Amino acid sequence: MSDIETIRDNYLAQIADADLAALEDIRVAALGKQGEISLLLKTLGKMTPEERQSEGPRINGARAAVADAITLRKEALEDAALAQKLAGEAIDLTLSAHDAPRGTIHPVSQVMDELAEIFADLGFAVATGPEIEDDWRNFTALNIPETHPARAMHDTFYFPDQDEQGREMLLRTHTSPVQIRTMMDVAKRSQGAGEPIRIIAPGRTYRSDSDATHTPMFHQVEGLVIDRDIHMGHLKWTLETFVRAFFERDDIELRMRPSYFPFTEPSAEVDVGFSVEKGKRIIGGDPYGANGGWMEILGSGMVHPKVIANCGLDPNEWQGFAFGCGIDRLAMLKYGMEDLRAFFDGDLRWSGHYGFGALDVPTLSGGVGA
Ligand code: DAH
């Protein structure tokens, strides 16, 4: 074996059992600027072409073999070091994880869910309608005459332009147009024959109004029951059952006061009785006791025959009751917020305090009749 192969094999043998530090020394000794193989490569320049032809491949071959061996050995050593490190490391699963930031359910969403839950137990479906309404559904069909103050510009947000069909468009001022939409759908589906209806319609409503108890955008829930033999007794029982389930007390008294709404006849405003327990005002208890009293919570009545007829149903065959109630106020009464405007400020401290955990069990102690 010539010098070159001896030199090469010598390095290969060293490389085979070198550690990482030794490997670097070997690389410098063999392939560094003044390395043994590097110097051999330099001798090629002084050789005759014939010599170069035979020596060149040998020297270059030795250089490549040593360089490759160093790379492979280095990789093997690094892999082994990593494997050893991993084997020695254990993950401590008892350490608590970082708390991820968690959002909360807004009290309005929570109350809407509670409403849907309670009324589902009473056989009501949830209906929806658009927040951009035409004034026929928002007013006219509900028997609200042109001259009614609710139509005045200062209450209603009108759009500057009419829609393609030439209708006046607005942001709905209440959820009552969903009554119209529901009855019209039924009239259409049944080709005017009609069928029983039981719906609630929670959603956003808009009026040009702003103070501690009014915001330009607020929430209502509408209720509508249509059938052949519905009377005010059904209305009173339904509202009583709802209020008791919602406030989770059985001793809540309801009071109905005669009132006026264009779309109901007769109409009634409904108050809940409150009392004072441990210095705090609560819904329920004896409204006639010391500091007790009544608080208005909603408007209601028997659906006006004209409204039923406007929707294409026969008011001699079908009648029923309706009610409309502010959701924000329900939330304030149940969960104790003071300022309505804070509902819509988007302050995370407020949501953190009054919001509900998405995975928490529902606050309702049980459905209706539980
Ligand atoms: N739409 C009425 C309002 O916004 C509330 C209302 C009253 C709705 C009586 C009804 C009802 O369905 O029967 O003030």
Image (tube, rainbow, N blue to C red):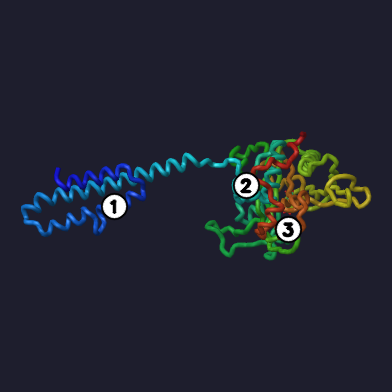
Along the viewing direction, whichever of 116 and 141 lies nearer the viewer: 116
Q: Which mark is residue 305?
A: none
Along the viewing direction, whichever of 119 and 161 lies nearer the viewer: 119
- Describe the element under mark 1 as helix, strand or loop: helix
- Looking at the picture, does residue 312 appear above or below residue 344? above
Q: Of callouts 2 and 1, which one flags the residue occurring earlier in the amino acid sequence?
A: 1
Extreme residue toward the right, this view:
290
| Lateral position of residue 13 relative to residue 364, left or right | left
Residue denoted by label 3: 340
| Lateral position of residue 39 relative to residue 251, left or right | left
Tag 3 near tag 2, CB within 8 Å? no
Where does the image place residue 112, in percent across and percent down from the top left? Answer: 68, 46
Q: Amino acid at mark 3?
A: Leu
Tag 1 near tag 3, CB within 8 Å? no
Tag 2 near tag 1, CB within 8 Å? no
Q: Amino acid at mark 1?
A: Arg
Q: Which mark is residue 27?
A: 1
Circle 2 packing at 10 Å, graded few (<14), some (14-19), many (20+), is: some
Tell me where residue 370 sits by quadrant: top right
- Describe the element under mark 3 as helix, strand or loop: helix
Q: Amino acid at mark 2?
A: Thr
